[in-house]
Amino acid sequence: MNVDIRRVRDDLDALRDAAGLGHDFGPAAVRSCLLFACAGAAACVWALVPHGLPPATALAAFAVPAVDWLMACKRSESVPPGADADWREWRKALPVFLLVLPLVSLHVWCRAVGLPPAQFLGLSTFAIGFVLFSSAVARRSQLPLVGWAVGLLAGGLLLPLDPARAVLVLSACVGAGALLSAGIASFVRPRGG
C-alpha cells in the first residue's frame, strides 16, 4: 500500500508541475542553500590564507553540503528503501544527464581552438548558470534557482579574468548564489504549510 500512496503522490506532483505550481522550497531547501553558502565562505577563507597547500583543497568544504543535499534527496525519493528505481525515476533524471553532452562538446571545441582551461571553465560555468536562469524565469515555482544562476553567471564571467584564483572565484560565487537562493526560497515558500 505504501508504494501505491507514493505513486499517487508522484502523480499529483507531476500534475502540480504541469500546472506550473511546482514543488515548495521548504526548510530543507533553505538549509541546504545555507550549508552551501557556509561552505563557499569557508572555501574562500581557505583559498586566501597562506598555508602551502594547493588551493583546490578548499573545494573539500563543499563535501558536507553535497552529502547533506544527497541525503535530503534520498529521504524525499518516491522509491521505498531496498526497492529498485523504476523507469519513471530514470526518465526524470535523464534530462540532467543529457546536459553533460553539450559540456563535453564545448570542452572538445575549446581544446581544438586552443582556449586555456580557465576559459573553458568560465564558459561552462556561465552555460550552467544560463540553464538555471532559464528554468528559474520560466516557472515561478523555480524562482529560488535565480540565486544559484546569478552566482554561476557571475563566476563564469569572472573566471577567465583571474585563472590563478579560480577556486576563490568559484567558491565566492557559489556561496553568494546559495545565500541568495536561501533568501529567495525563504520568502517564496508558502506560509503556514
Image (cartoon, rainbow, N blue to C red):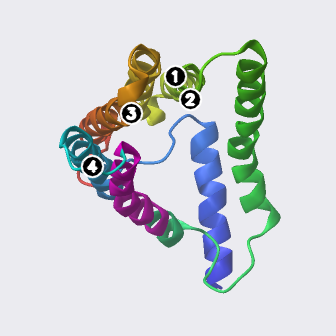
Name the residue tied to disc 2.
128
Q: Residues within 10 Å of mark 2 (few under 14, many from 20)?
A: some
Height in image: 27 above or below 98? below
- Using the rendered view, name the quadrant where residue 48 is placed: top left
Q: Nearer the viewer, mark 3 or mark 4?
A: 4
Name the foreground residue: 38 vs 53. Answer: 53
> The N terminus lies in which quarter of the figure?
bottom right
Height in image: 27 above or below 67? above
Pinpoint residue 129: horizontal percent, then vertical percent: 50, 26
Give the side of residue 110 with respect to residue 21, left or right.
right
Q: Nearer the viewer, mark 2 or mark 3?
A: 3
Dot 2 or dot 4, earlier in sequence: 4
Dot 3 or dot 4, earlier in sequence: 4
SS label for mark 1: helix
Name the residue tied to disc 3.
170
- Which kind of residue does numbered mark 2 sit on? Ile
